Image (cartoon, rainbow, N blue to C red):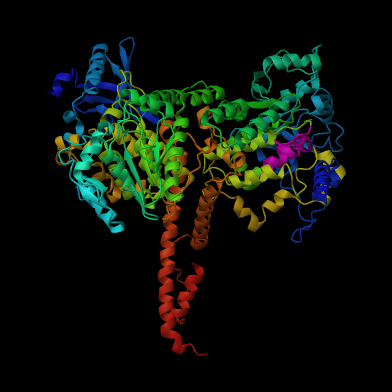
């Protein structure tokens, strides 16, 4: 008994470590990886370099290179060319947490952009900031109208003024139309996850109880609102041809959720494996989503919840819904999403450590830990995460957001149940068939035997050659 | 009775047709005795060819002089016809209503249908009881074929040839029939090769308030027990309902009279409740309000998935008794024509790999549903959209297909057929050009001479050109008993039926085609490898004297 108690208390202590540098990624040293390898896939600068459409009216600003202007932003951001660094500093003072509006995505079809930020600190006195207004004006320079998607209800946005926050008023931001779309945040989402997991854990329910509990958890409602709002952003950008600014209160959760989902729908590059991982890197990790705080505890925790919230899990669920409706459109498979869902809570790699770039630099994450995304892309590992049915398409893929079209992500929430094993086998069967098909088909995918045989070979040797090729 | 009497306006021009997921079409609408036909103006091809029997209800609307008829079909499709001219519209609407509510069976389309294809294999002759008995004979000699019901006088809803225990004579059968509801005495449903146990089905025993007993009935079911072993009686009613049945002449098997049998009650909802459930479910699926809460509430309130779970659980129980416990099982409800058949046929899907092949599944439906006397005509007279007064309609067979789909989804490599096969069967039970699902029992089908006057569904579907779209590319034959999970979390809504017209499946279909193509190509290459290997082996033996270095 004493041993058991000792082990239990050791586990409790070890699983509640606070300091980042004590975490395993700093000690994980597999023999096949080297610390001096490339870290990460993408960055603001890389994205700028790849996107020709941006070079004309936009620039990369390093005003935040020492993280003093905005502690949660990366060191480089993309802003309109005509707005100088001074104005950015002023705008940062006017936004919660210093998160002034920056570019997240430029649409290849029409050059319209998706920007993201946090709420403006108008406060009860209705303060205004000329630099912030000029910044936003520069964004839509040339077109007449932009949309602000505020992820709070109208009421919440107004109440925010009492605590120093607020929204962009029509009078100050005359060329921007504001649309409110309420999203739950923080504790409510964590509660939702806890209830959902509880409902899934008991297979002896009657169907009524199961459906009741599923409904009460409201998890699918959150999936529904995330996909709907992302669809709205896409409509504004692709159909109406206008730029969009997305923000909530802090700009670190639902903002990132909506803007990254919208990119998945709009941009074929985000649907490739490297593109998707790059998107996550730029618009979640580097954009300052506080992973450490959000993923400190999950659904089974007894600890008093502080800042935990499954925003990233919600993103993965929404991506899974899209994959389910468009099985040919994504280069990666559900297996990747499941892997990421696991890594974000507990990992051997340093990718999801800390809360923002500043903290990662201070702790020396790049130098002292291994990069998850690089390891996912190594040749023998990568293939488990690829979708065998992938066919690239240039079009935007519009997911249906009818509640009847959204399903519970059984792959994640019912992962450890018995019948999931059969599905796994079926999937492996499909995958092994496709793998063999690809290997045998070779580069030219024809049935004709190659006519490169030397005539002096015996029939025996010819056959051996053919067999090797096949 | 002339169809022409019912058709007020046989033709209308300039009609616009709206269908889910397809562009609108303008053309000429024609009403024949059996079909609603729309041919497109542009290229004279037929865009719509709808059987009147497929129409559940219609709604009329008028905007100015343009009339709109909304046709709601039994297969859950909803189409809209815009007809210029109020009078024409009214005439057409009332003609459709008259034609889609014809009662007499012999007026139905299967009697008029002349197939364009050649009937190579007559579906009416494929699954006759004599053939099934031959298979049984090869496994055991405990049974015989009885002709006691030759003229359907002993049991009107049973077929004319019955498989009964060898030692029971025809007179005992007559006595046992008088002791069971509708004359449906215990009959063999399935013989489990692995351990020789059997599953039988019947209707409720007519014990009544006096506690009647029938020695012949007891002898009949005891004959299926091995010496010293027990059997299970699965009653698909709750104990309370079974008790109440006594007051109306029915009842259940008393322990005192059937000491070797243990009775288990596993309630399955009665069929009249099922129709309500279906109506509510379809209404929930059509709800456009975009609220997740409302959708889940309505789904729960419809109770459809509870029914799916109930039936699957009971079928698993029956299968467990036979396979795991090694005991024989007798299944019955009240009339033995609805929940009983759901349980026995599903249990066979679980237990018997042969039922998971296409032929085996067709044979299962023939035996356990058609010949067993499930009243298809009554049950499928109306579907979810009907406005008529409900009589004895109930989606019993649809519920069975839903359960099969749940198992198919959980074991994607174990079935030779795919989801489309199940959807096709659903469609044909409600409206069909084939005579297979007409009538309520074998006696009726013989009287109507269906096998001579109509074409069987199996004649059409078993042709290779038709069959290929119903084959499951992932099928790998196995000999296993497959146990489906009945946890509510594992049971999904059958989107293929219920959300078929709400959401386009274009992307899913493309993915499926890609998968089929990959698997086919893989098989080709595999064959090539095998033949090359054989050649290699041959050459090795020929070459070996020459191989010395």
Count numbered badges in the picture. 0
Residue B381 image position (x, y, % from top left): 28, 27
Where residue A296 sits, quadrant-wise, is: top right
Residue at image coords 75%, 22%:
A119
Residue A443 image position (x, y, % from top left): 52, 61
A295 part of magenta stretch: yes
Residue B327 image position (x, y, % from top left): 41, 48
Q: Is residue A56 left or right of residue B107?
A: right
Q: Nearer the viewer, residue A155 or B104?
A: B104
A425 part of magenta stretch: no
Residue numbers of the magenta segment: A277-303
Q: From the viewer's perspective, is residue B19 above or below residue A362?
A: above
Report the quarter where the N terminus of chain B lies: top left
Residue at image coords 47%, 31%:
B305
Q: Is residue B312 left or right of residue B374?
A: right
Q: Residue furthest top?
A: B64
Q: From the viewer's perspective, is residue A461 above or below residue A418?
A: below
Answer whether residue B504 is visible to the viewer in this image: no
Answer whether residue A130 is visible to the viewer in this image: yes
Q: Residue furthest left?
A: B1
Residue B204 image position (x, y, % from top left): 32, 33
Where residue A43 sits, quadrant-wise, is: top right
Q: From the viewer's perspective, is residue B472 above or below residue A76?
A: below
Q: Is residue B176 left or right of residue A155?
A: left
Q: Is residue B237 left or right of residue A179?
A: left
Q: Nearer the viewer, residue B166 or B81?
A: B166
Where residue B147 sits, quadrant-wise, is: top left
């Amino acid at each position: 008994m004493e041993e058991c108690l000792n082990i239990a208390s050791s586990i409790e202590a070890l699983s509640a470590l606070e300091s980042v540098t004590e975490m395993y990624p700093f000690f994980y040293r597999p023999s096949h990886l080297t610390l001096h390898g490339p870290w990460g896939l993408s960055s603001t600068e890389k994205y700028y370099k790849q996107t020709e459409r941006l070079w004309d009216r936009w620039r990369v600003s390093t005003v935040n290179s020492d993280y003093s202007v905005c502690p949660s932003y990366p060191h480089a951001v993309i802003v309109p060319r005509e707005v100088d660094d001074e104005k950015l500093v002023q705008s940062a003072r006017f936004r919660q947490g210093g998160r002034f509006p920056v570019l997240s995505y430029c649409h290849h079809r029409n050059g319209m952009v998706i920007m993201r930020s946090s709420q403006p600190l108008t406060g009860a006195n209705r303060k205004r900031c000329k630099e912030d207004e000029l910044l936003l004006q520069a964004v839509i320079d040339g077109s007449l109208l932009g949309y602000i998607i505020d992820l709070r209800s109208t009421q919440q946005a107004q109440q925010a003024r009492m605590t120093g926050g607020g929204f962009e008023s029509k009078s100050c931001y005359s060329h921007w139309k504001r649309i409110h779309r309420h999203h739950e945040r923080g504790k409510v989402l964590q509660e939702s996850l806890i209830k959902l997991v509880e409902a899934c854990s008991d297979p002896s329910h009657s169907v009524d109880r199961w459906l009741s509990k599923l409904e009460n958890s409201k998890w699918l409602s959150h999936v529904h609102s995330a996909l709907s709002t992302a669809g709205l952003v896409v409509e504004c950008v692709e159909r109406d041809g206008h730029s969009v600014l997305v923000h909530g209160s802090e700009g670190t959760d639902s903002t990132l959720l909506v803007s990254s989902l919208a990119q998945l729908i709009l941009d074929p590059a985000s649907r490739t494996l490297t593109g998707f991982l790059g998107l996550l890197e730029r618009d979640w990790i580097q954009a300052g989503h506080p992973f450490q705080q959000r993923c400190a505890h999950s659904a089974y925790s007894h600890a008093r919840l502080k800042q935990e919230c499954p925003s990233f899990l919600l993103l993965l669920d929404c991506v899974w819904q899209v994959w389910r409706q468009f099985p040919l459109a994504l280069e990666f498979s559900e297996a990747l999403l499941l892997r990421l869902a696991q890594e974000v809570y507990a990992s051997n790699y340093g990718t999801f450590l800390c809360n923002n770039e500043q903290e990662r630099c201070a702790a020396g994450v790049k130098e002292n830990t291994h990069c998850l995304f690089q390891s996912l892309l190594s040749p023998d590992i990568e293939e488990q995460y690829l979708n065998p049915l992938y066919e690239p398409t240039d079009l935007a893929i519009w997911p249906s957001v009818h509640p009847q079209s959204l399903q519970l992500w059984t792959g994640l929430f019912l992962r450890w149940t018995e019948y999931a094993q059969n599905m796994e086998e079926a999937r492996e069967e499909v995958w092994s068939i496709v793998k063999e098909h690809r290997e045998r088909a070779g580069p030219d995918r024809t049935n004709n035997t190659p006519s490169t045989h030397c005539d002096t070979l015996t029939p025996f040797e010819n056959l051996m050659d053919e067999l090797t090729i096949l | 009775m002339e169809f022409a009497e019912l058709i007020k306006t046989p033709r209308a021009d300039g009609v616009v047709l709206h269908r889910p997921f397809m562009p609108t079409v303008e053309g000429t609408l024609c009403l024949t005795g059996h079909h609603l036909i729309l041919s497109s103006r542009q290229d004279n091809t037929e865009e719509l060819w709808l059987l009147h029997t497929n129409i559940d209800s219609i709604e009329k609307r008028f905007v100015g002089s343009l009339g709109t008829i909304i046709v709601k079909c039994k297969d859950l499709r909803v189409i809209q016809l815009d007809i210029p001219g109020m009078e024409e519209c009214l005439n057409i609407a009332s003609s459709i209503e008259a034609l889609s509510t014809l009662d007499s069976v012999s007026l139905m389309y299967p009697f008029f249908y002349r197939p364009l294809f050649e009937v190579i294999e007559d579906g009416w002759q494929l699954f006759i009881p004599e053939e099934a008995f031959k298979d049984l004979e090869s496994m055991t000699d405990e049974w015989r074929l009885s002709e006691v019901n030759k003229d359907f006088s002993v049991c009107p809803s049973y077929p004319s040839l019955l498989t009964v225990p060898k030692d029971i004579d025809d007179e005992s059968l007559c006595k046992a029939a008088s002791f069971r509801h509708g004359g449906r005495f215990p009959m063999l449903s399935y013989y489990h090769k692995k351990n020789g146990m059997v599953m039988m089905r019947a209707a409720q025993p007519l014990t009544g308030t006096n506690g009647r007993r029938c020695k012949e009935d007891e002898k009949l079911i005891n004959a299926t027990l091995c010496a010293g072993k027990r059997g299970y009686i699965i009653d698909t009613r709750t104990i309370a309902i079974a008790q109440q049945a006594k007051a109306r002449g029915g009842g259940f098997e008393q322990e005192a009279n059937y000491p070797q049998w243990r009775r288990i009650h596993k309630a399955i909802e009665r069929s009249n409740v099922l129709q309500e459930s279906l109506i509510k479910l379809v209404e929930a699926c059509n709800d456009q309000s975009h609220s997740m809460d409302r959708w889940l509430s309505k789904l729960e309130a419809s109770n459809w998935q509870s029914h799916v779970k109930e039936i699957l659980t009971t079928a698993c129980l029956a299968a467990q008794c036979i396979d795991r416990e090694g005991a024989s099982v007798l299944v019955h409800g009240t009339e033995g024509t609805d929940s009983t058949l759901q349980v026995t046929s599903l249990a066979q899907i679980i237990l018997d790999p042969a039922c998971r092949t296409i032929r085996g599944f067709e044979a299962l439906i023939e035996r356990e549903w058609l010949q067993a006397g499930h009243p298809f005509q009554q049950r499928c007279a109306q579907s979810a959209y009907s406005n008529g007064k409900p009589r004895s309609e109930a989606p019993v067979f649809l519920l069975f297909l839903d359960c099969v789909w749940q198992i198919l989804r959980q074991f994607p490599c174990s079935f030779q057929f795919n989801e489309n096969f199940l959807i096709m069967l659903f469609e044909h039970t409600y409206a069909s050009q084939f005579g297979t699902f007409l009538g309520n029992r074998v006696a009726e089908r013989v009287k109507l001479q269906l096998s001579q006057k109509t074409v069987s569904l199996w004649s059409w579907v078993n042709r290779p050109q038709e069959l290929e779209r119903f084959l499951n590319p992932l099928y790998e034959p196995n000999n296993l008993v497959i146990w489906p999970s009945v946890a509510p979390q594992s049971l999904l809504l059958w989107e293929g039926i219920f959300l078929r017209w709400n959401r386009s499946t274009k992307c899913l279909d493309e993915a499926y085609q890609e998968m089929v193509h990959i698997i086919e190509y893989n098989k080709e290459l595999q064959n090539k490898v095998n033949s090359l290997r054989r050649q290699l082996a041959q050459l090795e033996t020929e070459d070996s004297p020459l191989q010395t270095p």
